[in-house]
Image (tube, rainbow, N blue to C red):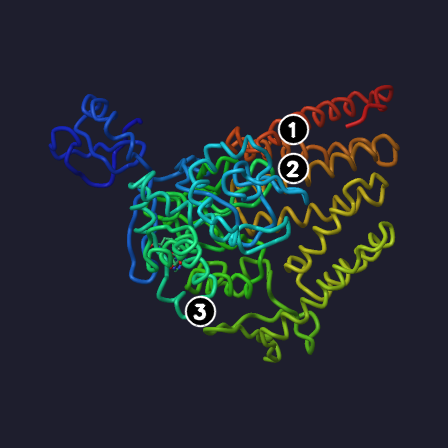
Amino acid sequence: MGGGRGRGSGPCGVCHVSSTMTCGGCGEMHYCGRDHQKRHWAQHRATCKPFKMVTHPDLGRYMVTTRRLKAGENVLVDQPLAFGPLPYFAAVCLGCHRLLPEELFRCPGCWWPLCSQECATSKLHERECPILAKDTEHVAVPQNNEETMRYDIIMVLRVLMLRESNPEGWGVVMNMEHHSEERAKETKVDLEINIHVLRNILGLNCAEKEVEQVRGAIATNAMQMTSPYGVPLRALHPRVHFFNHSCTPNLQLSFTTEGEMYVRTAVALEPGEPMYVTYTGTAMPLWERRACLRENYFFTCECKRCEDPNELDTDFSNPKCLECGNVIMKPHTWVGNIKWVCPNCKAEKSEQRVKEEVQTVLTTLDMSDVSDTSSIRRLQYLLEQVGQEFHPQHFVWMKVAQRMLHKLMNDETERGITLRVEIWKKLSVLYGKLEPGMTRKRGMGILEMALSMMKWIRNEYLQNSIYAPALMIKLKPVIEQFQEAADILSLEPAQVNVHVLAERALIRKQEACELMKEMERGDLLSRGKGC
Ligand SMILES: C[S@@+](CC[C@H](N)C(=O)[O-])C[C@H]1O[C@@H](n2cnc3c(N)ncnc32)[C@H](O)[C@@H]1O
């Protein structure tokens, strides 16, 4: 709770006397003194958040901070109103959301595929089962375990059921941005199928407009989460949907497998700063982010990354000029398409052309999976080539580098370890630019970089190929990196898988410290220990 001197004065939350002291949690509520603050806490705690909603004619409603926030501060825990399968997906259990085998168990009540009888009576499926059971001829039920659009209906149904089970939550959904008007201009086949199934087959009492609005609200506001079995799901939350988008988010979201969403700051924020999440992820090139935001969310992003022709010093989506060799072309954007212009010779490249160039490399990448050793060599060649054809932090480079790391995962040869070190060093710098601050991506990048470096140092030490003091100079930053990774990853909620990586980072740090001591002692006898 705590208290502080806020900006200006306001009426005390208890006695309404004009006061300058504010609640340390939100920085908004005023108090005349500690006594009244303590007395008010039981009432205030439910609304005490370090941010508030503001509105803007172009941006709609969005959240800004109400006080200074440190990087890594928890600002919100949001419970889902509803969650369910993605609209187009392979057979997944409606009780526990696990992927189902070819031989499907059918719910005795509604005939939808489930994993077992246990899930037929699970909390999640139990309520929707009698409604789905009205489809007595199984018209809308998935027929086998292949991908199907039939899952589209489930999330819509679960949200419509809030009308009875959670009227307050239903009110929240009805108040969400849905872009129905814009969506109405596009193909309506899926919507029409939804309406037909819900009203005519399941006999649900809902207006066409209501279904349209619910679908629009899901498409505009649902976040992707993962089931306990690793299946991607979409979830609607009552408060987190008010955060607007930036391609360089300043918030980090973490989901539990039950859909509980934890929101924390990635970087320090000043009072009044807008708070952003990312709707697209940060690893898409400019043209893909633009298209995704335009087609699904109906806006053109003007964040600092999109507005910066260098994309925050990465040239992540920029091609090189064929005429001038090494000169990077810069985007000149207008509504619809992007064209790139060479700052030197003014040559131009269309969006279509840039996409084709990129696609050529990505196709080669897809084909490089033939046999392991040869594909590593081919990937290495491709990585070098891409490094010449594109900026070293271009997204194509990132894709090839990630594939290469995947291939090298179990490669313990000297060449494999050295390559991993080189790639992780570059990749973790890139991750730090795409998602700066205390972000999971950056934390994991730092951890991987430190792990590969540690392995390399230990190898060199065991082989006696490099003078120990030189290795000690290299080991010192690795120890710091393990600590930094642990500091970042320990911010993940305990229920989230990556949280355990924080402990692993600390164990590795301990091992690195021991190796350092061993080197200091010049203790040759203990060199056999593995890391
Ligand atoms: C999940 S909602 C966010 C809350 C929304 N602003 C509201 O008023 O309910 C997503 C919608 O917000 C708007 N939006 C989000 N981020 C934006 C941004 N960076 N610039 C412009 N509009 C944005 C778009 O209309 C988008 O479809």
Quadrant assignment for the C terminus: top right
Give left or right: position of 244 versus 442. Answer: left
Looking at marks 1 and 2 on the same chain, the residue that comes earlier in the sequence is marked by 2
Q: Which residue is mark 3?
A: 186
Q: Nearer the viewer, residue 267 or 278?
A: 278
Q: Position of residue 287 (x, y in %)?
A: 55, 66
| Residue located beneath label 2 in the image | 447
Earlier residue among tags 1 and 3: 3
Residue type for callout 2? Leu
Residue 414: image x %, image y %?
85, 41
Q: For the point 63% across and 50% down, which residue is it?
A: 144
Q: Secondary structure at mark 3?
A: loop
Q: Is mark 3 within 8 Å of ligand 1?
A: no
In the picture provided, is 372 more to the left or to the right than 358? right
Mark 1 or 3, closer to the camera: 3
Q: Position of residue 359 (x, y in %)?
A: 68, 67
Q: Position of residue 102 (x, y in %)?
A: 68, 45
Residue on which disc 1 sits: 504
Q: Residue at x 29, y 58 (%)?
A: 56
| Residue 419 vertical placement versus 211 (above, below) | above
Marks 2 and 1: in contact by CB < 8 Å? yes
Compared with residue 194, is residue 116 higher up or lower down, i.e. above or below?
A: above
